[in-house]
Each structure stands twice: as C-alpha cells, then as structure tokens.
Image: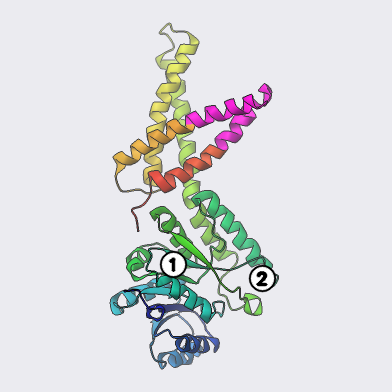
C-alpha cells in the first residue's frame, strides 16, 4: 500500500529557539503532519518554556540534551528515538528550526516519500536569487563543485537541512560518523559511496534577517565540512606520494645495486628496474588506499582485481591521450606538458573510480 504523506515524521534539531518554532510546529500540524520530534540540543533555561509549549501540542515529542552536542548528535538522537518508538511511520523529514523550510516544502518531500523509493531526497535552494547572502551563495557553490569533482555527482545544495528518507534507512543514517554540521556532509558522501540515489527537489529559498538565526559558524563549521569533503582525497594524495617514493627507491636499488654488474644494456636494466619497482609500489598503493584512504573492510580479492584493471586502463588512456594530441597537431616539444595535463585528469578519475567502484561500500 502506498504510504500517506502525513505518515512521515518531522524531525527538528533545535538550539536556542524563539517563538517562531512553536508557530512552525503548529503550521506543520495544521497541514496534516501527525508526528513531530524536536530535539533540544542543550538550549538555555530561558528557552525551556518554548519546549514546554511544544510538548503540549498533539503529536509533538521533545527530547532534551543536557548540554550542546551538535547538530549531528541531535539528529541521531532523534533517529534513534524514532527507530525505537515509531514503527509505523513511512519515513523521516529533517527540517531546521530557523524558519528556512516552509511547510509546503516539507509536504512536497513527504509526497516524494510516498513513492517508497530507496533515496535521500534533498530540498534544494536556488542560490542565484538576489536576496541570498553572498557568503551563502559563494560557500554553497564552491562546495557543490568540490563535491562533484571528488564524488561524481553535482548537488546544487549540499548544505540543505531539509532532507527525507524512508524509515528503512534509519540504521544506515545512525551509522554515519559526525557530531556537528559536518555530519550532513558525511551523509552525502556515505550515500555516494553506498550507491543510494540523492534526488534534489527545488524548494523556496528563505533567508530571514540575512540568516541571522542560524547557528552555523562560518569559519569553524566550514573547516569541519571541508575536512570531511577533502579528508579521503588528502589521504589519497599522501598514499600516492608514499607509493611514488617506494617506486623510486625500488627503481634505484634495482638499477644501481641489484642489476649494476649483470652485463645488460642500460635500456634493459631500466626496463627491468621499472617493471620491478611498479610491481612493488602498486600493491603498496592498493593496500594503503584500502586501509588508510577508503577504509574498506569487505572483499579484498575482488577489489584487488578491479584495482589491477584500473591500473592497466589508466596506463592505456595516458598513452592514447598523448598519441591523440600528437595526431591533432600538438607540437612535440609540448609532449611533457600534454602528458602532465592528461595524467592529472586521470588522477582525479582514478580517485573517483576507486571511491565509487573499487572500494564502494555495501549498498545502503
């Protein structure tokens, strides 16, 4: 049977709310939502009457943290309570308490949940509108481009708090790391790696009082978010550098120590040294990527075979790219530059292929 939109639960993490939150909750109830869960993430005593007002509303549950733990923890507190106490809901819709998410947009996500698809629905704002604060426009567009470059999917709004997913995805969401705003970025990365579709739905772009009600700290929380986005790629570069040093070291040992006196020509010595060095450095790179970069704990044999296929494909593509540019008239003097450009593109491609195919997490 197709779920009814009203069977979705609204989850609102809240810190130091004002009178708008009870008004917002009342509007959600009037629209047809029957269950709301509000998480008080360590708000001051001055805000407790507001939470008391919320508790008196039909269908509203208020959960409390004694101290502030962060948005990620607040969301997971709500997820755990919903998992344990609301077995009949169709899905979860997360909304912010600062007035950015309209009631009608929440209902649109609830209608999307009625399709009962395995997906993460994202309320996507239009940052090209003139009333959007400059810092929000620049920050979101930059993050979207970086996310696309590293994870292969362009999401117009990576920092939206209006999200929805089926009840079946609660264990997956609870297992994702993160305590504060970086948790929401971790969710996007986890969905990308697990093959869970992320489906944007255009919503109204609301910024009340230039977004002054937000508890997002531009510097501190941006650092946390970019540490999440770039973390595995920085480790990937570190593994690449270590593998390069291993490769060069093995080549030097083979050329100058092992094969120095065998009587072979220099070309043969260098060829044997290169192949031997690659046979040593490639498995080292695979092990570092598996254990340190992507922290993959599943079928190593299958991943190793895929990795070997990727290495062969990258070598072929690198050679073909330089050859094609040469056929198109690229001057011979620029061969090194063209190879550098092609190999740089292939390097990012290698990261994305390893992230999404070789070391992909189990399906969510």
Residue 73 visible, this angle: no
Find residue 124 and report its horizontal and vertical position in percent.
Answer: 55, 67
Q: Secondary structure at mark 2?
A: loop
Q: Earlier in the sequence, mark 1 or mark 2?
A: 2
Number of marks present in the image shown: 2
Question: In the drawing, does residue 192 fall left or right of residue 342?
Answer: left
Which region of the structure is painted magenta? 315-344
Residue under the point 62% across and 62% down: 139
| Residue found at the far front of this picture | 1
> In which quadrant of the rendered view does residue 100 lie?
bottom right
Residue 209 visible, this angle: yes
What separation in Å lies between label 1 and label 2 (alpha carbons)? 27 Å
Residue under the point 43% across and 33% down: 311
Q: Please state which of the two labelled residues, at mark 1 or mark 2, is closer to the viewer.
A: 2
> In which quadrant of the rendered view does residue 166 lie?
bottom left
Q: Secondary structure at mark 1?
A: loop
| Residue found at the far top of this picture | 263
> In which quadrant of the rendered view does residue 137 lie?
bottom right
Find residue 168 and report its horizontal and vertical position in percent.
Answer: 32, 67
Find residue 322 and report its horizontal and vertical position in percent.
Answer: 58, 27
Question: In the drawing, does residue 303 fall left or right of residue 246?
Answer: left
Observer-nearest residue: 204 or 76? 204
> From the viewer's perspective, is residue 220 above or below residue 1?
above
Residue under the point 43% across and 92% down: 52
* Numbered label attached to residue 132: 2
As for residue 31 lying within the magenta part, the answer is no
> From the viewer's perspective, is residue 177 above or below residue 235?
below
Q: Give the crowd class for mark 2: few <14, some 14-19, many >=20 residues within 10 Å.
A: some
Q: Main secondary structure of the magenta part?
A: helix
Observer-nearest residue: 76 or 113? 113
- Locate the N terminus by quadrant: bottom left
Q: Which residue is mark 1?
A: 179
């Amino acid at each position: 049977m197709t779920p009814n939109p009203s069977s979705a639960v609204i989850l609102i993490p809240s810190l130091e709310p004002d009178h708008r939150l009870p008004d917002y909750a009342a509007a959600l109830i009037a629209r047809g939502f029957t269950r709301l869960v509000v998480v008080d993430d360590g708000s001051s005593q001055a805000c407790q009457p507001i939470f008391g007002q919320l508790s008196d509303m039909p269908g509203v549950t208020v959960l409390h943290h004694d101290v502030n733990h962060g948005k990620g923890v607040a969301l997971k507190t709500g997820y755990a309570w919903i998992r344990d106490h609301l077995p009949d809901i169709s899905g979860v819709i997360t909304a912010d308490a600062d007035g950015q998410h309209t009631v009608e947009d929440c209902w649109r996500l609830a209608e999307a949940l009625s399709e009962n698809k395995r997906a993460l629905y994202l309320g996507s704002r239009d940052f090209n509108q003139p009333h959007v604060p400059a810092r929000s426009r620049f920050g979101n567009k930059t993050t979207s481009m970086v996310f696309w470059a590293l994870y292969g999917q362009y999401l117009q709004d990576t920092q939206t708090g209006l999200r929805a997913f089926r009840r079946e995805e609660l264990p997956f969401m609870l297992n994702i790391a993160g305590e504060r705003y970086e948790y929401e970025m971790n969710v996007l990365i986890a969905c990308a790696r697990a093959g869970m579709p992320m489906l944007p739905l255009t919503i109204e772009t609301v910024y009340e009082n230039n977004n002054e009600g937000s508890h997002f700290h531009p510097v501190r929380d941006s650092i946390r978010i970019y540490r999440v986005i770039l973390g595995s790629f920085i480790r990937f570069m570190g593994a690449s550098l270590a593998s390069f040093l291993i490769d060069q070291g093995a080549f030097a040992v083979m050329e100058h120590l092992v094969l120095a006196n065998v009587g072979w020509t220099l070309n043969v010595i260098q060829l044997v040294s290169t192949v031997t060095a690659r046979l040593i450095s490639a498995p080292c790179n695979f092990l570092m990527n598996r254990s340190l970069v992507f922290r993959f704990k599943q079928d190593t044999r299958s991943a190793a075979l895929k990795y070997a296929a990727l290495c062969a494909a990258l070598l072929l593509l690198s050679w073909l790219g330089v050859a094609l540019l040469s056929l198109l008239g690229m001057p011979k003097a620029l061969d090194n530059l063209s190879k550098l450009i092609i190999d740089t593109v292939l390097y990012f491609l290698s990261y994305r292929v390893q992230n999404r195919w070789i070391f992909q997490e189990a399906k969510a």
